[in-house]
Amino acid sequence: MCAYAGLMGSTLTPGVPTTADLMEAVAAVGTAYFHDFAAAAARHGLTSSQAKALKAVQEPVPMRALAGRLGCDASNVTGIVDRLESLGLAGREAAAADRRVKIVTITPAGARTLEAIRADMTRAHEAFGSLDEEQREALGRLCRQVLPLLTGGQ
């Protein structure tokens, strides 16, 4: 709780927020969301990195690309995937075109676990569920506009 409590001190006031106000608000939302995600993952015996990896391999992904998606070193991804494999949540196999390339895929058990983690994110469900249809559409539109600029279009 303490890890993101400081971000909550900066609240948006009525009127047009500054860019800095929006940046702090989005950071606070992201941090709170991450804590909810990490807590849900832990309830299913996974670290947040392992759960993020499961989310990233819903479609088959080469190990190197997975490292890029997770923003970590390839050697770290090996450990994450080793653990997911040992739990029966993911698998890896050699790519047909280049046997040196390992492709990671989610298993049916991994897909069920990922769905259970999402379902257990009670604070996120409560927060986003409080938005009406018009607010959800507006938030989705704004995220689609800003996210590519933050990620370089990735």
Image: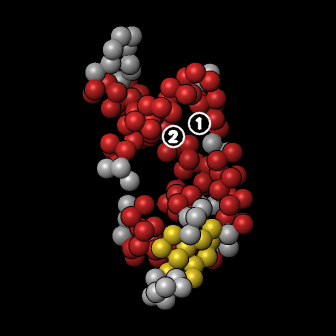
Q: Residue furthest front?
A: 97
Image location (x, y in percent) of residue 110: 67, 64
Image location (x, y in percent) of residue 130: 62, 24
Q: Residue furthest bottom?
A: 99
Label 1 secondary element: helix
Q: Which residue is located at x 58 percent, y 64 percent?
A: 59
Q: Check contact, mark 1 vs mark 2: CB within 8 A.
A: yes
In the picture shown, does residue 110 fall above or below 33? below
Pointer 2 residue: 33
Q: Which residue is located at x 62 percent, y 21 percent?
A: 132
Q: Report the number of numbered marks.
A: 2
Callout 1, which amino acid?
Ala
The first of marks 1 and 2 along the sequence is: 2
Label 2 secondary element: helix
Q: Which residue is located at x 51 percent, y 44 percent?
A: 35
Pointer 1 residue: 124
Question: In this rendering, does residue 51 appear at all?
Answer: no
Q: Which residue is located at x 31 percent, y 24 percent?
A: 21
In the picture shown, does residue 42 fall above or below 106? above
Image location (x, y in percent) of residue 38: 54, 50
Image location (x, y in percent) of residue 44: 66, 57
Which residue is nearer to you in this view: 95 or 26?
A: 95
In the picture shown, does residue 130 fall above or below 144? above
Callout 2, which amino acid?
Tyr
From the viewer's perspective, is 24 left or right of 95? left
Q: What is the C-alpha distance between the residues marked 1 and 2? A: 6 Å
